[in-house]
Each structure stands twice: as structure tokens, then as C-alpha cells.
Image (cartoon, rainbow, N blue to C red):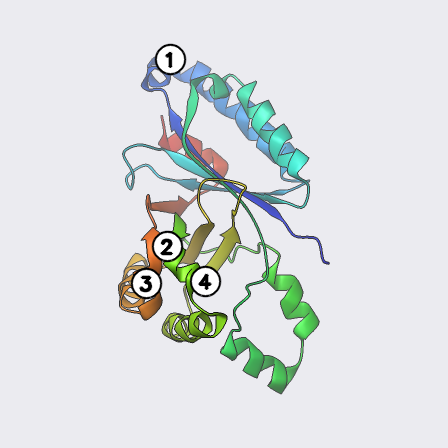
């Protein structure tokens, strides 16, 4: 089995008291934090997204992925030991793994039949490869128990419709990761795209599919703005 990746979405909130510190002290905290992430990004994937202006209960996201769970642990530990970390809380945190879907994607099957490349595609399914979009849309999701009582054939039929609808928005990239037993949710769904309106229209269309009736919850939802880490930190104060 190819190595799968551990994925974490750490969603941070800054203590408002931090903003009362002198700017020189805040900049020193940012420098230390930025230096830590610059060191870690050599070993694992880390992307930053600002939530200032889109959420009231959180300020930024660090999207992380690694084949080694210890790297996620070490990063969290070292963040806790930074001066900025002393002012950060985690109102939301989602932990998951990559996994090949049990449902066939007819579009992928047709592509492989025509062009080949199954090995490359199989590897891509278990690797997180952000496409550098302007926005990241993230939410946890849980299916109802009734979903799992359906036959695989019925679930595949509904997923065929779900995939067919999603295929109409090819510019919105989906990253689905799995949390069964690892965290409270069953999935963490992360979309990437350049136009929030396109994502909104896609989600509205997906709500009309048959499979949507078997969603127990898919909130809270986060819209992150892709920014460099320094820009992200500057947005919080």
C-alpha cells in the first residue's frame, strides 16, 4: 500500500490582548513564528490562509500534511512554545488522512481508458497537492447512519450524480480526507478555487442531489484567503 498522508487543519484565534502589545514586540513574535514554519516547511506541507474578514471566531488556518504523524505533533508542540503561541487558541481543529475513495469516478475511469496513467492517478488520490488557488473552503462532514445501511450499488448511483454535478465546476478542486475514528467528523472537505461565487453555486447544486439528503452535518464552514504566512500574521494585528 502506498504511503498515505496525515492531514490537519489548525484554525487559530489570537487573544485580543496581544494586539495591545507594542508593535516591536508583536513583530518579534511574528518573526519567531515565521522562522519556525520556514524550518518545518522543508519537512512537510504547510499552507496559511487568513480568516480575518470571513469568520468572527477564528483568525487563520494552517493546512498541514505529512506522511509522518510525529511531524504534526512536533509542529504543534513547537508552536505552543513560541511567544505568539502563548496568545493563540484553537477554536477548531480537524485531523484526517488521505484515502482512495471506495466509489468509482466515471470521469477518471474514462480518462485512464483513453490516456492511461492509472499509477500516477492512484498516487495523486492519496497525496495532498494544493493548486495555489486564491481561496480555501473547509468544513467537516458526517453522513447519516442510514447512508451506511444502503447497498453499495445505491450509494454508487447517488455518488455518480454527485460527481457528475461537481464535474460542471472543473475550476473548483476538491480535496476529501477521512477521519473515521481519528477525530469527531467522518470527513474533512476542502475545496480550492479563485471565485467564491463559483464555489457557492457548486454547493447549492450539490444540495439538490439525492446523496445530500444523507448528510448529518457539514458545518462549521471556513473561507480562507491564501496569503503568505507574514501577510496572514499581519492581518491579525
68 left or right, relative to 37: right
Can you name the residue that lies furthest to the right here? Answer: 1
Q: Position of residue 127 (x, y in %)?
A: 61, 56
Q: Position of residue 150 (x, y in %)?
A: 42, 66
**Residue at horizontal 65%, vertical 67%?**
122
On residue 144, which mark appears? Answer: 2
The residue carrying pointer 1 sits among few (fewer than 14), some (14 to 19) or many (20 or more) residues within 10 Å by Cα, namely few
Foreground label between 1 and 2: 2
| Pointers 1 and 2 in contact (C-beta within 8 Å) | no
Q: Position of residue 9 (x, y in %)?
A: 48, 41
Q: Which residue is mark 4?
A: 173
**Residue at horizontal 37%, vertical 54%?**
144
N-terminal of the pair, mark 3 or mark 1, is 1
Mark 4 falls on what kind of element?
strand
| Pointers 4 and 3 in contact (C-beta within 8 Å) | no
Can you name the residue that lies furthest to the bottom here? Answer: 114
The residue carrying pointer 2 sits among few (fewer than 14), some (14 to 19) or many (20 or more) residues within 10 Å by Cα, namely few
Measured Cα–Cα span from mark 1 to mark 2? 47 Å
| Pointers 1 and 4 in contact (C-beta within 8 Å) | no
Can you name the residue that lies furthest to the front here? Answer: 149
Residue 94 sits above or below residue 151 on the image:
above
N-terminal of the pair, mark 2 or mark 3, is 2
| Pointers 2 and 3 in contact (C-beta within 8 Å) | no
N-terminal of the pair, mark 1 or mark 4, is 1
Residue 22 appears in the rendering: yes
Measured Cα–Cα span from mark 4 to mark 3? 19 Å
**Residue at horizontal 46%, vertical 49%?**
186
Question: Residue 32: which quarter of the image?
Answer: top right
Measured Cα–Cα span from mark 3 to mark 1? 47 Å
On residue 21, which mark appears? Answer: 1
On residue 212, which mark appears? Answer: 3
Residue 204 sits above or below residue 61 on the image:
below
Amino acid at each position: 500500500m502506498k504511503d498515505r498522508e496525515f492531514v490537519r487543519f489548525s484554525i487559530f484565534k489570537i487573544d485580543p490582548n496581544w494586539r495591545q502589545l507594542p508593535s516591536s514586540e508583536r513583530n518579534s513574535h511574528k518573526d519567531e513564528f515565521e522562522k519556525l514554519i520556514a524550518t518545518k516547511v522543508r519537512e512537510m506541507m504547510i499552507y496559511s490562509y487568513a480568516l480575518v474578514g470571513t469568520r468572527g471566531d477564528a483568525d487563520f488556518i494552517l493546512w498541514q500534511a505529512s506522511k509522518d504523524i510525529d511531524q504534526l505533533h512536533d509542529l504543534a508542540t513547537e508552536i505552543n512554545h513560541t511567544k505568539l503561541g502563548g496568545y493563540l487558541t484553537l477554536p477548531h481543529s480537524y485531523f484526517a488522512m488521505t484515502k482512495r475513495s471506495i466509489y468509482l469516478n466515471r470521469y477518471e475511469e474514462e480518462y485512464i481508458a483513453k490516456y492511461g496513467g492509472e499509477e500516477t492517478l492512484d498516487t495523486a488520490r492519496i497525496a495532498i497537492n494544493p493548486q495555489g488557488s486564491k481561496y480555501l473552503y473547509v468544513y467537516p462532514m458526517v453522513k447519516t447512519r442510514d447512508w451506511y445501511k444502503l447497498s453499495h450499488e445505491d450509494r454508487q448511483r447517488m455518488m455518480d450524480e454527485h460527481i457528475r454535478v461537481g464535474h460542471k465546476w472543473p475550476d473548483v478542486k476538491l480535496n476529501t480526507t477521512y477521519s473515521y475514528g481519528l477525530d469527531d467528523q467522518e470527513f474533512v472537505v476542502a475545496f480550492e478555487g479563485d471565485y467564491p461565487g463559483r464555489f457557492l453555486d457548486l454547493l447549492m447544486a450539490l444540495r439538490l442531489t439525492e446523496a445530500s439528503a444523507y448528510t448529518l452535518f457539514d458545518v462549521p464552514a471556513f473561507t480562507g484567503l491564501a496569503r503568505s504566512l507574514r501577510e496572514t500574521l499581519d492581518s491579525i494585528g
